[in-house]
Image (spheres, rainbow, N blue to C red):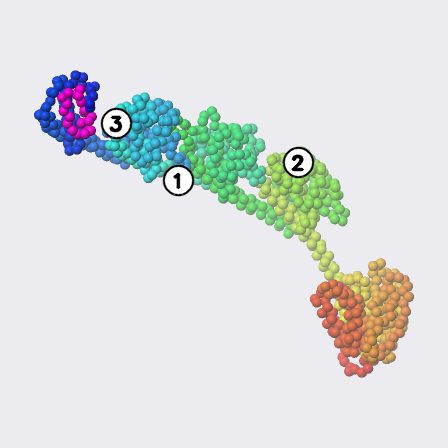
């Protein structure tokens, strides 16, 4: 009856409960009840309770009793309502004071753990609870970088508790269903109240509550970001309702604000600390002058600032094409402490290959497998191994290996400290910048040294006029500038096909003398042969430090580009062979023996040696050019003298004869020609005409022409037979000329009075006679062979006559052999046509037409042979004119 009245708000009067179907015997009163009056306690429409009167007698109550008790219920309800209002006001005031206290503490500098404990304490004072806890979502690096991390219970870490054993909580968290219960409040905005049929939560499981226990979990959110969960638990059922939801939501909001403020404050403190540390690192790196000191300093600072267990720096070596461990702490690499060999790591190892490709931080699980470096394992204590790239202009120049101790407690703390990661990244970045700056500084210094070294060699080259002195200076400068042990310069003797040692510097005088005494023919020295054939630098390793210089030729050296890829160690002695060449012409070789060199200066030393080899090549070429220049100057003087002699023997003016006109053309293919002509008087009534062509060009032809001209002139003075004059000159030439030298000539004696012509031809082009009266062109008879070949020629005199208006043209084969740009010959037919077409004109006009035709035919192409034309025309009547210089009309 009581529940029905409480639900419906109406009074029930029952004088016999056995007849009332709603009656149920209550458990808290005697079971002999026979009559019952149940009256609701109401204020307005709100039921505050039920007034229940029971009697052992049947029909114990009537309507008067009902009215009485209903009248009595009204003030009771009012009193209860007033009491509830007062109690609620006290409770609300207590809640408000709790909110105020929490808000005041949020603005203070109270540590976060104490603030969270205070929030739980205040919450327990206003809500029923046996235990409470605050769980925080652990931040991940992705969340710090602005990437939304997945919000799951696996990232919740216990931050504060009351009345709980943390060990039992951690045991309870091993259950999957409990973790699932923790996920529910992370994905809602309102507190979640546990239902009776819900699985256990962590607090109920840890305290061993009955399944119907009460629990509420409120999400802690700020700016749409989950920070954690606030949970309460009570052993009784139904202890949390709407007011509890509102209160826990408010306390959760306060807690979220407090957590966010604390984190922001901690982050600012961490940033200040990180900035201070990085500033110290930057200041420490500014005063460092070399890379080894830099890496040692960074290792020391990492150990002091971070408390690392192990760390190491790897740097990429261009000369080695591998990563080399340059500095380390916390372990000892395999091998002796002095490290006679560099500790190298191939770029093809899995970890380094990923680092080069991704260019970002890597976590290493097993250094023995990923890096082939078992010494870096973090055992027996647990830890985290990371590898950070040293980046410059998006290029990996090294790696920073760090092993940190990692304290792990299940459900409380795990992972890598973001602050430590930021500091390590700062160290890696600062190290990269400083390494790059130091390398640039070293490169500038090395470049300056290379320039100074090559300048010193260049000064030695230009300051010496003797090649041997220059080469001697070079071989003695190289040990000083480069630090090499032995240096030899071989020059190639093309005449004798030998490599001759010119200068050498060695460990002792005996080796130098022995080296200078031994030249090498092709096939006797493999290194010199390879350099001469390929024109490329060669190198090889000398495994025997006592190997004599004479045995170097047996070494199996390879081209530098191929050998450099196979080098794994620079230890030991090395042989380098550089060609002394200009534009592919090998003039010699520079051999150098090098002892163990630092890998950092390997390329620079080779650059200096290569530069010295080029300077040596220039010195050799300059000496050859100097010799050629001296020879050229001598030849030019001889040619100039020969041309002066040649021009002296040629007529400087054309003689004048009554009723006759003369003209000529003479052009040499070179500075000195082999063609010549001559016109000389024979008494008062005859004149001699000579044209000749020496079968050569240049100085030999000019000298041979001079001799022939002299012989013909001397013979013409005592003979009226051209054939006999040429025969006599031939005999003298045959006795003194070489097999390859001969001369063709045509000699004619002309009577100025009668026009009779006596003519002989020694292998020369047939002269042309134009008959003015008939317009015919006559080719004069052939002659014998050229002068200077056979002792006897069998030449004959031919007699002709020139009538008034007739013209005689003597020429050399330079006209008919004239070539056009298309390779076509000028030819005899074209020559004959020009003379025949213009034969009736004055002789000067005829030759001018011939000039124009040859110029148009050549079109700027220089003549390949000397061109000479000598022409005479008999005029019946003409005006007397002055003497004419031979140079007039001389050039075609």
Give me the residue at 25% from left, 32% from top: 242
Q: Quadrant of the N terminus?
A: top left
Q: Which mark is residue 146?
A: 1
| Alpha carbon separation for disc pair 2 and 1 | 60 Å
- Dot 3 or dot 2: first in sequence order is 3
Report whether 643 appears left or right of 145: right
Magenta span includes 3: yes
How packed is label 2: few (under 14 Cα within 10 Å), some, or many (20 or more)? some
Side (left or right) of 362 relative to 459: left
Q: In this rendering, which labeled residue sits more in front, label 3 or label 2? A: 3
In this view, 513 is above or below 842: above
The image quarter in which residue 37 lies: top left
Q: Percent x, y for residue 441?
A: 51, 44
Tag shown at residue 239? 3
Query: Residue 196: where, in percent of width, then height?
Result: 30, 26
Q: Earlier in the sequence, mark 3 or mark 1?
A: 1
Q: Which residue is mark 2?
A: 542
């Amino acid at each position: 009856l009581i529940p029905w009245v409480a639900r419906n708000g109406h009074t029930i009067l029952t004088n016999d409960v056995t007849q009332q179907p709603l009656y149920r015997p209550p458990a808290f009163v005697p079971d002999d009840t026979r009559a019952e009056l149940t009256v609701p306690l109401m204020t307005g429409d709100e039921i505050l309770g039920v007034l229940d009167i029971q009697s052992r007698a049947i029909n114990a109550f009537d309507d008067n009793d009902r009215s009485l008790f209903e009248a009595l219920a009204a003030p009771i309800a009012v009193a209860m309502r007033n009491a509830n209002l007062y109690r609620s006001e006290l409770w609300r005031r207590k809640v408000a004071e709790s909110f105020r206290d929490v808000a005041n503490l949020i603005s203070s500098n109270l540590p976060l753990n104490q603030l969270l404990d205070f929030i739980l304490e205040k919450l327990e004072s206003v809500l029923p609870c046996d235990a409470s806890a605050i769980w925080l979502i652990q931040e991940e690096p992705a969340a710090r970088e602005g990437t939304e991390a997945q919000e799951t219970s696996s990232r919740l870490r216990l931050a504060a508790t009351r009345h709980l054993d943390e060990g039992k909580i951690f045991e309870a968290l091993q259950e999957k269903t409990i973790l699932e219960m923790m996920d529910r409040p992370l994905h809602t905005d309102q507190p979640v109240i546990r239902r009776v049929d819900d699985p256990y939560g962590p607090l109920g499981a840890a305290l061993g509550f009955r399944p119907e226990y009460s629990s509420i979990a409120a999400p802690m959110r700020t700016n749409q970001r989950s920070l954690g969960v606030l949970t309460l638990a009570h052993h009784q059922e139904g202890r949390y309702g709407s007011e509890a939801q509102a209160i826990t939501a408010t306390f959760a909001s306060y807690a979220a604000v407090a957590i966010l403020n604390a984190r922001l404050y901690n982050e600012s403190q961490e940033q200040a600390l990180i900035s201070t540390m990085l500033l110290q690192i930057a200041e420490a790196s500014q005063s460092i002058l070399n890379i080894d000191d830099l890496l040692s300093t960074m290792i020391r600072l990492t150990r002091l600032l971070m408390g690392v267990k192990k760390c190491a720096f790897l740097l990429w070596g261009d000369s080695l094409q591998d990563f080399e461990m340059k500095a380390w702490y916390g372990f000892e690499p395999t091998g002796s402490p002095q490290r006679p060999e560099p500790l190298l790591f191939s770029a093809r190892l899995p970890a380094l290959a990923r680092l080069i490709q991704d260019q970002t931080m890597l976590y290493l699980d097993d250094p023995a497998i990923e890096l082939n470096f078992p010494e870096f394992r973090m055992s027996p204590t647990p830890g985290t191994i990371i590898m950070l790239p040293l980046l410059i202009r998006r290029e990996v120049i090294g790696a920073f290996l760090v092993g940190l101790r990692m304290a792990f407690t299940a459900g409380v703390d795990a992972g890598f400290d973001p602050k430590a990661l930021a500091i390590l990244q700062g160290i890696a970045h600062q190290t990269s910048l400083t390494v790059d700056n130091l390398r640039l500084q070293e490169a500038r210094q090395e470049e300056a040294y290379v320039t100074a070294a090559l300048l010193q060699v260049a000064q030695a080259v230009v300051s010496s006029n003797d090649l041997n002195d220059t080469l001697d200076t070079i071989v003695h400068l190289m040990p000083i500038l480069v630090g090499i042990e032995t240096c030899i310069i071989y020059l190639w003797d093309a005449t004798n096909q030998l490599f001759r040692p010119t200068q050498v510097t060695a460990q002792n005088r005996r080796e130098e003398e022995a080296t200078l005494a031994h030249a090498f023919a092709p096939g006797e020295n493999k290194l010199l042969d390879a350099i001469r054939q390929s024109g490329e630098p060669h190198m090889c390793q000398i495994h025997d430090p006592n190997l004599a210089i004479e045995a170097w030729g047996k070494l199996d050296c390879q081209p530098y580009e191929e050998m450099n890829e196979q080098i794994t160690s620079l230890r030991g002695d090395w042989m380098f062979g550089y060609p002394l060449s200009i534009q592919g012409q090998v003039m010699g070789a520079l051999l150098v023996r090098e002892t163990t060199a630092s890998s950092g200066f390997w390329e620079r030393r080779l650059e200096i040696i290569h530069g010295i080899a080029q300077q040596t090549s220039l010195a050799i070429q300059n000496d050859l050019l100097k010799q050629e220049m001296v020879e050229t100057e001598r030849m030019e003087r001889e040619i100039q003298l020969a041309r002066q002699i040649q021009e002296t023997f040629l007529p400087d003016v054309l003689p004048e004869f009554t009723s006759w006109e003369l003209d000529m053309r003479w052009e040499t293919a070179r500075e000195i020609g082999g063609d010549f002509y001559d016109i000389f008087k024979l008494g008062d009534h005859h004149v001699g005409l000579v044209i000749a062509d020496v079968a050569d060009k240049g100085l030999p032809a000019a000298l041979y022409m001079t001799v022939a001209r002299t012989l013909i002139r001397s013979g013409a003075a005592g003979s009226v037979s051209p054939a006999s004059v040429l025969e006599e000159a031939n005999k003298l030439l045959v006795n003194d000329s070489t097999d390859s030298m001969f001369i063709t000539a045509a000699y004619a004696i002309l009577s100025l009075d009668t026009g009779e012509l006596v003519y002989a031809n020694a292998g020369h082009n047939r002269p042309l006679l134009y008959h003015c009266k008939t317009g015919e062109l006559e080719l004069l008879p052939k002659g014998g062979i050229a002068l200077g070949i056979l002792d006897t020629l069998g030449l004959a005199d031919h007699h002709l006559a020139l009538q008034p208006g007739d013209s005689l043209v003597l020429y050399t084969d330079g006209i008919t052999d004239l070539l056009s740009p298309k390779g076509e010959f000028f030819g005899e037919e074209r020559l004959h046509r020009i003379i025949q077409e213009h034969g009736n004109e004055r002789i000067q006009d005829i030759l001018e037409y011939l000039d124009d035709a040859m110029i148009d035919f050549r079109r700027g192409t220089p003549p390949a042979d000397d061109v000479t034309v000598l022409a005479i025309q008999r005029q019946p009547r003409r005006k007397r004119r002055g003497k004419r210089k031979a140079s007039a009309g001389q050039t075609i």
